[in-house]
Image: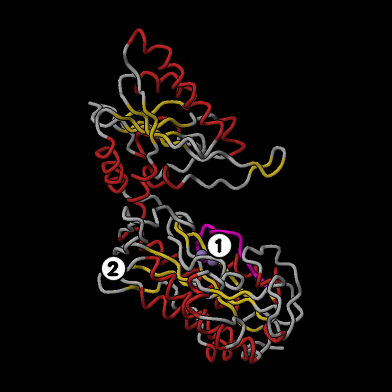
Amino acid sequence: MPLPLEVYAERRRVVLDRIGARGAAVFPAAPVAMRAADVEHRYRPDADLLYLTGFPEPEAVCLLLPGHPTDEFVLFVRPRNPERETWTGPRTGVEGAVEQYGAQSAHPIDTLDQKIVEYVGERDALYCAVGRDRAFAERVLGWLRHWQQCRPRTGKGPTALLDPAPIVHEQRLIKRDEEIDRMRRAAGISAEAHLLAMRSARHGEPEYAVEALIDHTFRRLGGNGPAYPSIVASGINATVLHYTANERTMRDGDLLLVDAGAEFDGYCADITRTYPVGRDFTPAQRAIYEVVLRAQAEAISVVRAEARIDDVHRRAVEVIVDGLLDLRVLLGERAEILEKDLYKPFYMHRTSHWLGLDVHDAGAYKEDDGGGRRLVPGMVLTVEPGIYIGPGCVDVDPRFAGIGVRIEDDVLVTATGCDVLTAAVPKDPADLAAVRRSVGP
Ligand code: GLY
Ligand code: MN
Ligand code: MN
């Protein structure tokens, strides 16, 4: 469901004000990705364009012209075309772009090159992210070439090409109420899917049976589908960070790592739980699990306004290092292990990323002082420590070999601390064992 038009207008106002009257900004739609010769992937709009306009169709461009007397917000869109619409469904069209999306002017997308050189020809700077789509970048080069050729006679035309992403992404980083509502829905749908998975995964069945249940639940509960390919990784597969084949047969005695999150109205959730396929953890699995659980709890306890995102990671790393030293998976001096990152064979990724319209959402992780970003109410980040004792980890007690554990929740920074949006999915070992014992043979 698109948001009220005023919400998009307020977001654009921030960008218009930052760019100023000498600049113009262009936000293109994501290109259609092909799956096979003439078969398209399901279309996912570019998050910046969606954030600023709500316009969801491919082949669109938003042009912002700060201070323009009549056309501050212009949309270029695919025109209506009854023959094409028979194949791919209704298009909003030029009139719809004005009536439904509040564009002050709208034009057919095939007039873009001609109109841009007119609209932007008297401004000094063009803001456009050219690094994402080579075909669109070629188009932008064509406009720049035009202005370069004309400038000796006209004395006009942008001389600067700038990236608008930081302006938009700083806004996207702080979620407002209407966004948090959607993130709560994405989290709720994802939590329900994880609970169903936890109650159904069983020995002798393929990982994809769990994947199917999860993805089915995302859609059934009104989500757009998975926010990223669901990871259902049993046994040694849990040590592969982005395992998505989901084809192994689950066995009693395995751990099952499920990393799956729904998208709802464009907003993503991202949850990981790890639990036994059988009725309970082995002692070695439980020992590793408890280290990760403690690392996550400690890391979440750091999340509050003014803390730095690097502090969240550091705390998780410290707890993991202490736990692995206790278990003698790591040997040596704590300080040296931390200083030289000697834990990385077992914990090789960061603890957090931003979450929002994209699963790895937009926004800088560093402050201008070079330190980690200070948290602000409205930011949403994951907290997802893990320990992975994969085939590359030699000289480890064989009891621990092949164990992979990650625990991931989505955390909203609030005025008073933080709110774990995905807390409904059990992670305490006793709660997990209770759920798993209720699963039939
Ligand atoms: N599921 C992707 C991630 O956890 O970052
Ligand atoms: Mn994540
Ligand atoms: Mn994840």
- Residue named by callout 1: 219
Q: Write down the quadrant of residue 343 in the picture.
A: bottom right
Q: Position of residue 266 (x, y in %)?
A: 46, 54
- Residue named by callout 2: 305
Q: Would you place residue 372 above or below residue 45 in this image?
A: below
Mark on residue 355?
A: none
Q: Horizontal placement of 21 versus 199: left or right?
A: left
Q: Which residues are magenta?
A: 219-233
Other residues around mark 2 within 10 Å, as few (<14) / some (14–19) / many (≥20): some
Q: Is residue 228 magenta?
A: yes
Q: Nearer the viewer, residue 417 or 32?
A: 417
**Regarding ligand 1, which quadrant of the image does it lie in?**
bottom right
Residue at 36% of width from left, 33% of height from top? Answer: 25
Mark nearer the N terminus (1 vs 2): 1
Q: Would you place residue 440 above or below residue 145 in this image?
A: below
Residue at mark 1 to residue at mark 2: CA–CA distance? 34 Å
Residue at 40% of width from left, 33% of height from top? Answer: 26
The disc labelled 1 sits on which kind of residue? Answer: Arg
